[in-house]
Amino acid sequence: MDLDSIAVSSTRKIVERCAAEAIDQIKDGDFVSAGRILNLVHNLPLDEASEQRWDIDYFLSMELPTFLEHFEEIKSARLIALYVCKQLAYQYVPD
C-alpha cells in the first residue's frame, strides 16, 4: 500500500513506523514479533469513512492490551505501544 493513499494522518504515521519495524524484524527472522506488530495495526482506519466507523475504545481496550500481553515476544513493544498511543492522542484528543 502506498502510504500517501492513507488519508488518516495518525494511521499513516503508525503504519509507516510499524511496517518499517516489522520489515526489520522479518529480515532478522523474527516472524512472531513482526506478525504481532502487523496485527496491532491491521484494523486502523485508512480514510474518513472508515474513521467514522472505527471504534477507538475497542482498539484501546482490546487490541492494544492483547499486543502488550505478548510484550516479551515483541522487539520494541514498549516503543511501538507508546508511539501508537502518541499518534492516536494527536488525532483524537481535543486541544
Image (tube, grey):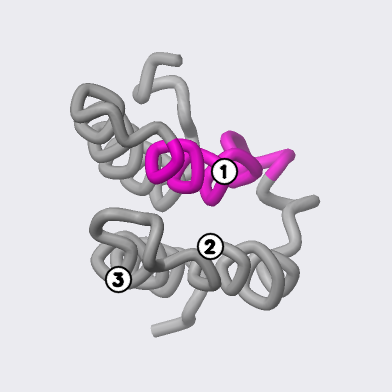
Is residue 48 magenta-colored? yes
Q: Earlier in the sequence, mark 1 or mark 2?
A: 1
| Residue at (75% x, 62% y) in the render | 55
Q: Which of marks 3 and 2 is nearer the N terminus?
A: 2
- The residue beneath circle 2 is 67
Q: In this view, does 74 lie above or below 3?
A: below
User: Relative to residue 39, is residue 54 drawn left or right?
Assistant: right
Q: Where is residue 87 in the image (x, y as percent from the top left)?
A: 36, 63
- The residue beneath circle 1 is 39
In which quadrant of the rendered image does the N terminus lie? top left
In which quadrant of the rendered image does the C terminus lie? bottom left
Name the amino acid, label 1. Answer: Asn
Name the amino acid, label 3. Answer: Arg
Specify start and end residues of the magenta stretch as a single range: 32-50
| Residue at (71% x, 41% y) in the render | 50
Near-viewer residue (8 or 81): 81
Q: How far apart are marks 3 and 2 (CA)?
A: 10 Å
Name the amino acid, label 2. Answer: Phe
Q: Where is residue 27 in the image (x, y as percent from the top left)?
A: 21, 22
| Residue at (65% x, 43% y) in the render | 43
Figure quadrant of residue 28: top left
Q: Is residue 34 above or below residue 66?
A: above
- The residue beneath circle 3 is 78
Q: How far apart are marks 1 and 2 (CA)?
A: 8 Å
- By secondary structure, the bulk of the magenta-drawn segment is best described as helix
Q: Which of marks 1 and 3 is nearer the N terminus?
A: 1
Query: Residue extending furthest top?
Result: 1
Per the image, label 1 sits on a secondary structure element best described as: helix
